Image (cartoon, rainbow, N blue to C red):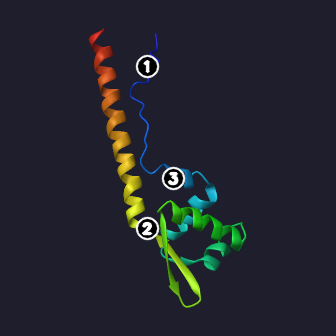
Amino acid sequence: MVSVDLRFVVTYQVGAQAWQALADGTRRAIMERLAHGPSAVGELARDLPVSRPAVSQHLKVLKAAGLVCDRAAGTRRVYQLDPTGLEALRADLDRFWTQALTNYAQTIDREGDDV
């Protein structure tokens, strides 16, 4: 018989806004592009199948989530990944997987004791 005990599954709370921001494919594409280095809105828009205003709106969401930051460069805004926000996501994932794998191992150990 296969067990459907899911006690090893955990949830996360920290950084919910960041995770929600990354639920959108266009925002993930922007993050991937910014992983290669800072970029202005116009440069990002050239690489994406959405308008420049749409890119600006996506960047606004990413900035509010703490995933990107910007700086003035003449008349342009240049965006880059925010290391603090990315570290928070990494910490979330580390906590999630540590707890999930610990719970999973405990479940396997308990089931092994029943054999």
- The x, y position of residue 30, in whole percent, is 57, 65
Q: Reading the chain from its start, which is encountered first: label 3 or label 1?
A: 1
Quarter the C terminus occupies: top left
Residue 25 vs 10, above or below: the answer is: below
Q: Are marks 1 and 2 in contact (CB under 8 Å)?
A: no
- Crowding around mark 1 (Cα neighbors within 10 Å: few <14, some 14 to 19, many 20+) is few
Pointer 1 or 2: first along the chain: 1
Give the alpha-carbon distance from disc 1 to disc 2, as whole Å: 38 Å
Q: Residue 49: x and y, percent?
A: 71, 66
| Residue underneath mark 2 | 82
Mark sitting on residue 5: 1
- The local secondary structure at tag 2 comes to loop
Q: Which amino acid type is shown beneath numbered disc 2?
A: Asp
Residue at figure coordinates x 56%, y 81% from the top left: 77
Q: Which residue is mark 3?
A: 17
Residue found at x 39% / y 66%? 83
Observer-nearest of 4 and 10 = 10
Q: CA distance from mark 3 to mark 1?
A: 29 Å
- Can you give x and y, in whole percent of width and height, for residue 85 in the image? 42, 61
Quadrant for residue 3, please give it: top left
- 68 sits to left or right of 91: right
Q: What secondary structure is found at the residue carrying circle 1?
A: loop
